[in-house]
Image (tube, coloured by chain):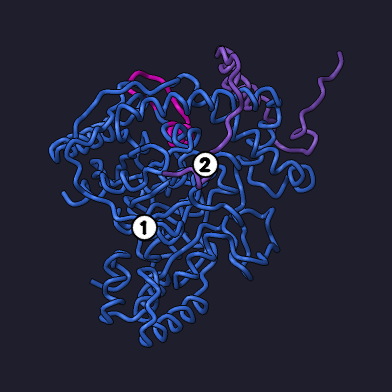
Chain colours: A purple, B blue
Amino acid sequence: MSDSVPDPAARAGLPPFADLARHIQDVVSVLRELDLGDTEPYRAEVPDAAV
Amino acid sequence: MRPYELTLTAAAHAIGDRELSPVELIDSVLERVAEVDSGLGAYALVTADRARAAAVRAEGEIAAGALRGPLHGVPYALKDLLDVAGLPTTASSRVRAGHRADTDSAVASRLAAAGGALVGKTHTHEFAYGLITPQTVNAVDPGRVAGGSSGGSAVAVASGTATFALGTDTGGSIRVSAALNGVVGLKPTHELVPRDGVVPLSWSLDHVGPITRTVADAALVLAALTGREYAPSAEIVGLRVGVPRNFYFEHVNPEVDSAVRAAIARLESLGARLVEVEVPMARYIQATQWGLMMSEASAYHERTLRTVPDLYTEDVRALLLAGEVLTAEDYLRAQRARTLMRQEWLRLLDTVDVVAAPSSALTAVPVGQKEVIWPDGTTESVPHAYARLSPPANITGLPALNVPVGHDSDGLPIGMQLIGGPYAEGVLLGVGLAYERL
């Protein structure tokens, strides 16, 4: 049986975080449902544009 | 009333009228620090000598007729993510041991120019990555959490160990901390207050803002931070207040729900017009916030996470490591979703002037409580419950103000957040002022 590759936390002797990582991936993957079409990544306004 | 109990507005008037000297005020505040902070743990560092020197300088300038403005000689605290030349910026982390800032952050520089007296640096949840601030306890009940990540700043203001403070807000850290301790907290429009010299959690979501005892105080601090005039009007007849029918009142403690709805009804009694609104893209709020915040936080900490991982606290290290699983596509998808979400919120804010909602789903829980069980039987982690209602204002960059609106049956503070259009801080402050005067 081949060992699975340990995650970076395990390599550092730290508690595993795989469950948390999977949870984060699951939450963020919901965005795949969106039809983003030609939508560009957000660019923040600058204060000079304030009214 | 002792000087440390004064609001910023009252202290400024008393100093301006020569009824109170800045030295009397700082001495009162430092005595209060000595009296209560060993139990509360708001401060990471107290700069008593520096504060007294600033107060003495202010007293001399004011006596010579050179009053700089309402912050002159007034004691304040800075969250320990904000650089002050010559002082460490620890971010409440062992990772930052030995750090000393060479220059002031932009906001520290502006408060120094306004003549404020820095009492010290306040604790944050490590690197602002959490909503508990475990070094600090709640100002109202020391058996309860302070909230976070600006817990130290909120507790300092609530307990009288600073007349005002600055915090940061990436996913609710000003608003939740303020709500849990019964003080006012303002997350300004993104980019309104400069972030130079502030340790980031997430560059595109971070905001710096004031934590104060009153709404009027918040206006004074915001003016000093921005160089703009804020003279909010408490006249709200005809103002359109959006009341969300989804998202903000879901899985909220019943006493929080009641208090916030009662506060909204009081706004209506002052002449505001209530309009039921639908929060856009509610299903995608958490995913967008996490896709942005976790990617950016893990990127900032990439190097030290490899070189000194054991210096992070366990919860923050786990979040940073776990965030590394997100891809560039995940991050860009979140940024594109953010574009849509902001467009939708701007459309919503064409129909109302402000949206009113709970700042936090819970009041301050007992220290050590990990989960909350909702009436429908579902469980939620406490940090998640605290974070859940904040992200729309961070994702969209819209301003949001926490206003205290009462207490639960255990006497714990409840906060309402008011969210407005870009650069509508004056409107939010006006609504808050109107409520506060009731």
Q: On the picture, is B269 further left or further right than B395? A: left
Label 1, secondary structure: give it.
loop
Q: Residue at x 46, y 19 (%)?
A: B283
Relative to B207, does residue B40 appear above or below in the rendering? Answer: below
**Image x and y of residue B194, in percent:** 54, 53
Q: Chain of mark 2?
A: B
Q: Which residue is mark 1?
A: B229
Q: Residue at x 60, y 55 (%)?
A: B196
Relative to B158, does residue B65 appear above or below in the rendering? Answer: below
Q: Between residues B103 and B297, which one lies in front from this camera angle?
A: B103
First in residue order: circle 2 vs circle 1: 2
Q: Quadrant of residue B157?
A: bottom left
Amino acid bearing label 2: Thr
Magenta stretch in the rendered image: B373-388
Tag count: 2
Q: Residue furthest left?
A: B269
Q: For residue B120: magenta? A: no
Q: Which residue is mark 2?
A: B170
Q: Between residues B381 and B320, which one lies in front from this camera angle?
A: B320
Amino acid bearing label 1: Glu
Mark drawn on residue B59: none
Label 2, secondary structure: give it.
loop
The quadrant of the rendering that contains the N terminus of chain B is: bottom left
**Image x and y of residue A23, in percent:** 60, 23
**Image x and y of residue B66, in percent:** 39, 81
| Separation of residues labelled 2 and 1 (CA atoms) | 25 Å
**Image x and y of residue B69, in percent:** 37, 71
Q: Residues within 10 Å of mark 1 (few under 14, many from 20)?
A: few
Q: Chain of mark 1?
A: B
Q: On the picture, is B127 further left or further right than B152? A: right
Q: Residues within 10 Å of mark 2 (few under 14, many from 20)?
A: many
Q: Between residues B219 and B137, which one lies in front from this camera angle?
A: B219
